[in-house]
Amino acid sequence: MKYMIKSALFIVMLLAFVTSSFAQFSSTVVAVRGVIMNELTGEPVKLKVQLMDETGKTVNRAFSNSLTGEYYMTGLRAGLTYKCRLVSDEFLVEEFVIHTPNTDKYLEISRDFMVKPLIAGKKIPLKVAPFELRKSKIKFGASEALEDITNALKLNEQVKFEIICYPDSETQVKSDPEITTQRANALRDYFVAVGISPDRISVEGSKQLDPDNPPPTQKAAKGKRYIGTTYVVIKEV
């Protein structure tokens, strides 16, 4: 009987501690600051920053500085997850998740963001090649590298775009002239599979080397191989 009473008291004390800690964390104010830059040029960007809680309710708004790209927002609570939406007529709408740490003290966290221009004809290169050398199938694990551009394209449903793939080398153009078209179609199929309308997508497989990012003329570092660039090109906005 005494053991049962002690156990019950322990559970009550534990619940009181957890409740107190949660209340303390949930009342702690967290601020977020950072810089927003143009992904293609590295220049600072002025746009609206909208912060939403897990229910979708807007909890704060701010504008980044046109000269520095800096923004600052406060009023976040510790131990929660927020969605940060970046909105501008000149850039694709983008959303990023912000997790605030559990803390009982005022805290400022730093998050920098890169945004993509919303300009017809603008070529947005994929940061990581989704293909292996001399292969046309999307490589294993590429979905993580494609997550950024995929989310941006999903959020901007009005935008039509073209996928352009360039060859790995002049030799490849002669030996496998269709590989770039196959790559573009494979990427198109990927986007359609994750929920992007096929009516928004066109493809082009180039038979020329990428004039903006050609193969290196010197021998690459060990383990590094040049793979033809893949671009998403904004067509209609």
Image: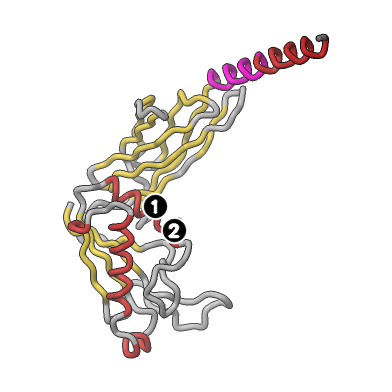
**Residue 216 image position (x, y, % from top left):** 44, 79
Res 232 → quadrant: bottom left
Q: Is residue 230 left or right of 102 when viewed as pictured?
A: left
Q: Residues within 10 Å of mark 1 (few under 14, many from 20)?
A: some
Q: Is residue 18 magenta?
A: yes
Res 71 → quadrant: top left
Q: Which residues are magenta?
A: 16-27
Q: Secondary structure at mark 1?
A: helix
**Residue 20 image position (x, y, % from top left):** 62, 15
The residue type indicated by label 2 comes to: Ala
Q: Residue at 64% across / 19% down in the picture? A: 18
Find residue 148 and name its label: 1
50 vs 218: above or below:
above
> How many numbered marks have been drawn onto this rendered protein structure?
2
**Residue 116 image position (x, y, % from top left):** 32, 52
| Towards the viewer: 48 or 66 | 48
Q: Residue at 35% across / 26% down in the picture? A: 57
**Predominant secondary structure in magenta?**
helix
Residue 211 in sight in this render: no
Q: Is residue 184 magenta?
A: no
Quadrant where the N terminus lies? top right
Seen from this angle, which residue lies furthest front? Answer: 1
Q: Is residue 229 left or right of 77 when viewed as pictured?
A: left
Q: Residues within 10 Å of mark 2 (few under 14, many from 20)?
A: some
Find residue 145 and name its label: 2
33 vs 148: above or below:
above
Q: Secondary structure at mark 2?
A: helix
The residue type indicated by label 1 comes to: Asp
C-alpha separation, residue under disc 2 versus residue under disc 1: 7 Å
**Residue 192 image position (x, y, % from top left):** 28, 57
